[in-house]
Each structure stands twice: as C-alpha cells, then as structure tokens.
Amino acid sequence: MRRYGWLALVPAIGMLGGIPFANRVHPYVAGLPFLLFWIVAWVVLASAIMALIAALDRARDRAERDAPR
C-alpha cells in the first residue's frame, strides 16, 4: 500500500471521531444544525481527499511507466 493511501482514513476519522464533539443543536451554520453541517462538510472533504489520492496515484503510475529501465 502506498503511503498516501492512508489519507483515505482521514474522512472516516473526521466523520465518526468528531461526532461527539460536534453533536450540538446550537449554533447553526449555513442554516443547518452544527452536526449536520459537520457531516456534510466531511462528505465534501472526503470527495476532495479521494480526488487527491487518485491524482497522486495517476502521477505515480505515469512516473513508473516513463522511468527508464
């Protein structure tokens, strides 16, 4: 497993590990209770992190393919 593959754990830790700290009805953020905002934010961040992992993976594959043998 490549080192940057461990980035895939960040959204799970943020989403599940942060719930006890984010479980508040007040304050509201963008019209949402904070817990719902927290989960939505982590879904968006998870997408960004997965896109970053895919880009790093493509770059590494390209570098391995273009490397002289």
Image: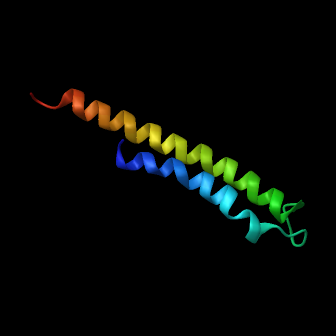
Quarter assignment of residue 20: bottom right
Measured as percent of width and height from the top left, residue 46 is found at 61, 47
Direction from residue 50 to residue 16 in the image, left or right: right
Measured as percent of width and height from the top left, residue 6 is found at 45, 50
Quarter assignment of residue 63: top left
Query: Closer to the camera, 21 or 40?
Result: 21
Measured as percent of width and height from the top left, residue 17 is found at 66, 62
Measured as percent of width and height from the top left, residue 37 is found at 79, 58
The mark total stands at 0
Q: Is residue 62 above or below residue 22?
A: above
Query: Closer to the camera, 18 or 39?
Result: 18
Q: Is residue 9 above or below residue 61?
A: below
Give the residue at x 63% y 59%.
14
Quarter assignment of residue 30: bottom right
Quadrant including the N terminus: top left
Q: Is residue 51 above or below residue 23?
A: above
Q: Is residue 49 above or below residue 24?
A: above
Give the residue at x 61% y 57%.
13
Query: Closer to the camera, 57 or 2?
Result: 2
Give the residue at x 16% y 32%.
67
Q: Residue furthest left?
A: 69
Give the residue at x 68% y 56%.
15
